[in-house]
Amino acid sequence: MYIIVIGGGRVGYYLIKALLDEGHEVLLIEKNASICETINDELGNVCFRGDGCEAATLAEIGTGRADMLIAVTGDDEDNFVACQVAKHKFNVPRTIARIRNPQNEILFKKLGIDVTVSSTNIILEHIEEQVPTHPLTHLLTLRDKGLEVVEVKIPPEANTVGKAVKELSLPEQSKLVLVISKERPPRLATANTVLQGGDQIIALTAPEAEEQLRTALRGG
């Protein structure tokens, strides 16, 4: 694959090293001349000095034939612009953007970025896995569909305990899939499934409906 990486900081540096080790054709775009020179001295002619947000730069490096563009600068706006230009002007089939502010993630997805990577959310999700009382845990992102697979834990004191799924005000963008209980084997969620304290609910939801889903399953 021909992969373009925007941003020659630590993330970009270690990323291109890993991609080169896997045998990919990789080109790094970096504004800073000294950083670019250092990388080229170590890894060969793999760094191009330029602004990855500019169409002229992307045209010069042959972005039109790229299989993927990954923007990992420290600036969310730069990463967004680079991915947008690559996708809409050069028809790059796959774009990935690093996000520092998790609040930008939904916006980036809505505006066509294929994959977003938020280090803050990754750390939070690892914390969630270790905290059994955490209300909602992300399990899987179906980015092409704009959906998330999440787990919601029902606490014993929740006012939804004893209610059937059909009695809940679930958001339209959400669907319950599986119920995992300590006392019985995992079972498919149906309209007649009754929630019990300690249940773990696996659900499919749109990212913007996560909070509404959590409230519907756990109560206010």
Image (cartoon, rainbow, N blue to C red):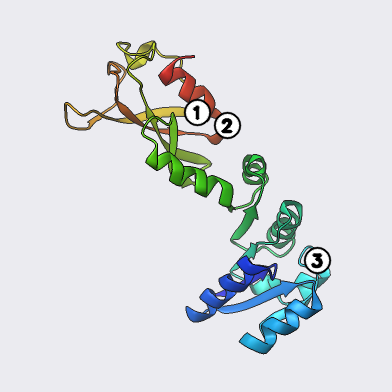
Residue 132 placement, left or right of 34? left
Residue 102 placement, left or right of 193? right
Q: Residue at x 50, y 43 (%)?
A: 124
Is mark 2 in CB contact (under 8 Å) with mark 1? yes
Is residue 204 visible in the rendered image? The answer is yes
Image quadrant where residue 133 sits: top left
Where is residue 146? Give x, y as percent: 53, 41
Where is residue 140? Give x, y as percent: 43, 45
Q: Residue at x 49, y 80 (%)?
A: 21
**Residue pointed to by mark 3:** 55
**Secondary structure at numbered mark 3:** helix
Kind of residue at badge 3: Ala
**Residue pointed to by mark 2:** 208
Image quadrant where residue 130 sits: top left
**Secondary structure at numbered mark 2:** helix
Above or below 53: residue 131: above
Q: Which mark is first along the chain, 1 or 3?
A: 3
**Residue pointed to by mark 1:** 173
Residue 61 placement, left or right of 197? right
Above or below 134: residue 115: below
Is residue 144 visible in the rendered image? The answer is no
Q: Which mark is first along the chain, 3 or 2?
A: 3
Image quadrant where residue 149 sits: top left
Callout 2 environment at 10 Å: few (<14), some (14 to 19), or many (20+)?
few
